[in-house]
Image (spheres, rainbow, N blue to C red):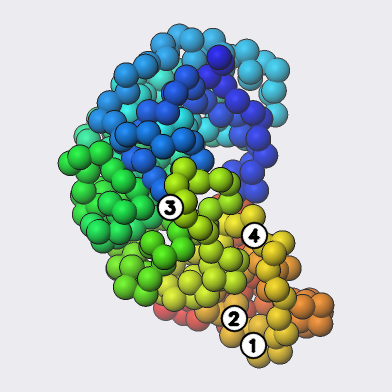
Amino acid sequence: MSSIFGPVHSRRFGTSLGIDLSSSNKQCNFDCLYCELAPAPALAHQHTITPVETILTDLKEALAKHPAIDVITITANGEPTMYPYLDYLVDEIDKIKGDIQTLILSNSACLNEPDVFTTLLKFDQVKLSLDAATPETFKKIDRPAEGIEISIIIESITRFSHVFEGKLFLEILFVKGVNDSLSEIAALERALLPISCDRIDIGTIDRPPAYAVEGLSFEELYLLSCRFDPVLPIHIVSRTHANATPSRYTDEEILTTLDKRPLSMDDIEALFDFDSKQRFKNLLEKEKIVQIERSNVIFFTPIENINRKRSK
C-alpha cells in the first residue's frame, strides 16, 4: 500500500498531497470519541514503521505525476509525530519539494518532547489539535495514552507558538454534550488567548465516528464561536453549512455580528436569508464591510473593526 494519497483540494490549505506515516493500521496515542477510524487502544509508540526510503520513493513518483501541488501534508492513521524518523524524513522532503509547502497535522500530544518540538519547527505550516482544556474533558473526548496531560500540551503549544516562524493553525472539534459546555469554552478561551496562531478552526463530527456520539449543528457551532473573545481568529469549519436555517439580519445586525465574529462567505450563505445577503452586498459596496485574509480563508468584518485595531 502506498504511503501517498491525493491530491486533495482544501479551501484552507490548497491542493495537498498527503503522506500517511501509518498506512497499514491505526497507531495513535489518542483514541478519540469522534475518530473516523475504528476504536483502538491508545499507544505510546508506533509498532509498524514504514521505511523513510519507501516514503520518499512514493513521494517522488507522486510529485512527478502531480506537479501542481501547494502543500505536502504529513499525517497518519493515528499520530504522525509518533513516527521515529520524522526529523530525517522532513530534511529529505525539503531537498526535493522545491517551492511546495510542508504541513503536519498533529494532535499535539508529543509536542513536549524536545526532538518533536525541534522537528516541527522545520515545517512551513503546522496544525495542532486542542479539543479540551480541562483534564476531565480531555480524558473523556481524546482518551489519551497513560501519562499524557492536557496542561503539558497547552504549555507546549503556547511555547511553540512564540518561536515557530511558519503558519500555525489550531483545530478544535466539538462533540455534543462532551466539550461544548460553558465552563469548557471558558477554559479553552483561557488556554487560547496566550497562543499566537494564524487561525483557530472549529468544527464538529461530519463522518461516522468511532463511538456513539453526535456533532453540533452549524447554528450551534456559530453560537459557540461567539462565546470566545473576538480577538481570537476563529474560523468555523463545517460540512453542515447546507443544513443551516438562514435568518433575517438588519444592516445594524449584520455589522454587529461581523464585528463580534468575522465570517467567511460560506458562513454568510448559511446564516443570512436572501434579503440579508442583499443588505450585506450593499454594505460591502459602500465599503462599510471589508475583507481580511487569514491564511487562505477570506473573512468579512466592518471597516470600523479594522480602524479600531489599527489605532491600538
Q: Which mark is residue 257?
A: 2
Real-space Cα separation, disc 3 to disc 2, in angstroms: 23 Å
Query: Quick one: which residue is furthest to the front in this view?
Result: 212
Q: Which mark is residue 203?
A: none
Which residue is located at x 41 percent, y 11 percent?
51
How far apart marks 4 and 3 lie (CA) works out to: 20 Å
> Label 1, on which residue?
253
- Mark 3 / mark 1, whichever is N-terminal: 3
Would you place residue 55 above or below residue 206 in this image? above
For numbered disc 1, what is the local secondary structure? helix
Horizontal relation, residue 114 to residue 55: left or right = left
Task: Determine which residue is flagged by label 3.
Answer: 170
Disc on the earlier residue, 1 or 4: 4
Judging from the image, what secondary structure is the residue with disc 3 in?
strand
Q: Is 301 in front, or is 108?
A: 108
Residue highlighted by disc 4: 240
Q: Are marks 2 and 4 in contact (CB under 8 Å)?
A: no
Query: x%, y% of residue 145?
Result: 25, 39
Callout 3 touching callout 1 (CB < 8 Å): no
Q: Nearer the viewer, residue 68 or 56?
A: 56
In this view, which residue lies farthest toward the left?
Answer: 147
Quadrant of the frame with the N terminus: top right
Residue sitting at x 52%, y 75%: 223
Given this view, does label 2 or label 4 mark the residue nearer the observer? 4
